[in-house]
Amino acid sequence: MAAPDMTVSRIGQVNLANDVQALFLTQYAGEVLTTFANECKFIDKQILRSISSGDAAQFPVMGLGSSEYHTPGTMITGETIAHAEKLISIDGLLIAPRFLAKIDEAMNHYDVRSLYTKDAGSALARKFDANVAQCIALAARASATITSGPVGDQINNVDIAEDDSTDANSVYQAAFAAQTILDGNNIPETERYLALKPTAYNTIVKGLTAVNELYTDGANGSIAKGKVYELAGFQLVKSNQIPSTNISSGPTAYQGDFSHTVGLAWHKSAVGTVKLLDLAMDMEYSAFHQGWLVVAKYAYGSGILRPEASVELLD
């Protein structure tokens, strides 16, 4: 007598119905999104806008008004305030494709899948951060959005060779110089950020002044944890995505020579991103390859809004 067929419990199905891979895709998408959110350091440090259709969005920019003393009996007529706008276009569809084998055991092996998901989320986050960082650097070099308005600036000779005292002092001085520039441009003191490459960031930790309770409130970081949270009124960001080469390919909005860029100081209003399609997933089975092609995708574009809110640090 032949053995009866077994009743298979397909662990990838939702409520025992339809696609046997549905839960795998849901789990995969959730893990990619979590990794992207954890590793993307620049997304909340700019102006972010979502659109439902189209290939670009307009960002209004308004100049500053003035005040005056009123002479009793005279007509109050108001004043003219300059307005402008910036158009930021969608770059295209940024994708992180990964191929998964058909075998259920392989797809359900959490350790293996986590490697795919983390890699896809990290790849999208790195590219997003790199594009925004390049925009911030270019903003410091750009002409004014408002006619005759203030512009960004650059600080030269910032030494980041990791000498504990000399180079830490160089970074400190650059941070305070950037603070002075933004103050002079009437940029709000809140939501200011200073992004440094790991070398420069670690230099100020090793310099100790930024974590010394004699100079701070005692909660600004730790030499043991290798952390510093604020410097010269800026929230610190450590990132490998600060550009360091001459970039001449990809979307033109991000191209430039960044060979001497070592850090970025900016306010949230310096750049903006328009998002058309949020982070999403596609999965398709290929009989030719006996497996599943899983694609993480994101459609957005970043651009300059207020040049006067950005300062580039150069070596």
Image (cartoon, rainbow, N blue to C red):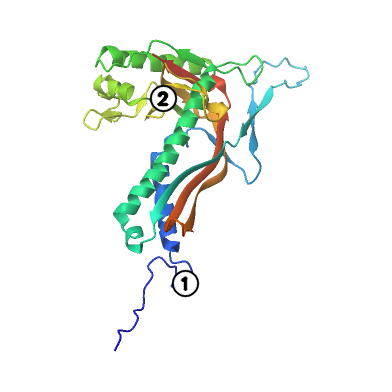
Label 1 secondary element: loop
Please tell me whether mark 1 or mark 2 is closer to you in this view. Answer: 1
Residue at (32, 26) in percent of width and height: 198
Q: What residue sits right under mark 2 in the picture? A: 194
Q: Amino acid at mark 1?
A: Ala
Q: Nearer the viewer, residue 95 or 190?
A: 95
For the C terminus, give its image quadrant.
Answer: top left
Figure check: 105 above or below 295: below
Q: Residue at x 32, y 24 (%)?
A: 201
Residue 214 in sight here: no
Give the residue drawn at x 47%, y 58%: 285
Q: Can you identify the residue that label 1 sits on?
A: 17
Q: Position of residue 169 (x, y in %)?
A: 31, 13
Which quadrant, please, contains the N terminus?
A: bottom left
Q: Is residue 278 left or right of residue 205?
A: right
Residue 118 at x, y = what percent?
A: 36, 46
Residue 236 position in % (x across, y down): 38, 28
Residue 8's place in the image compared with 48, above or below, is: below
Q: Residue furthest bottom?
A: 1
Q: Is residue 268 above or below residue 93?
A: above
Categorize mark 1 by other alpha carbons within 10 Å: few (<14), some (14-19), many (20+).
few
Residue 101's place in the image compared with 48, above or below, is below
Task: Give the Cα distance between marks 1 and 2.
Answer: 51 Å
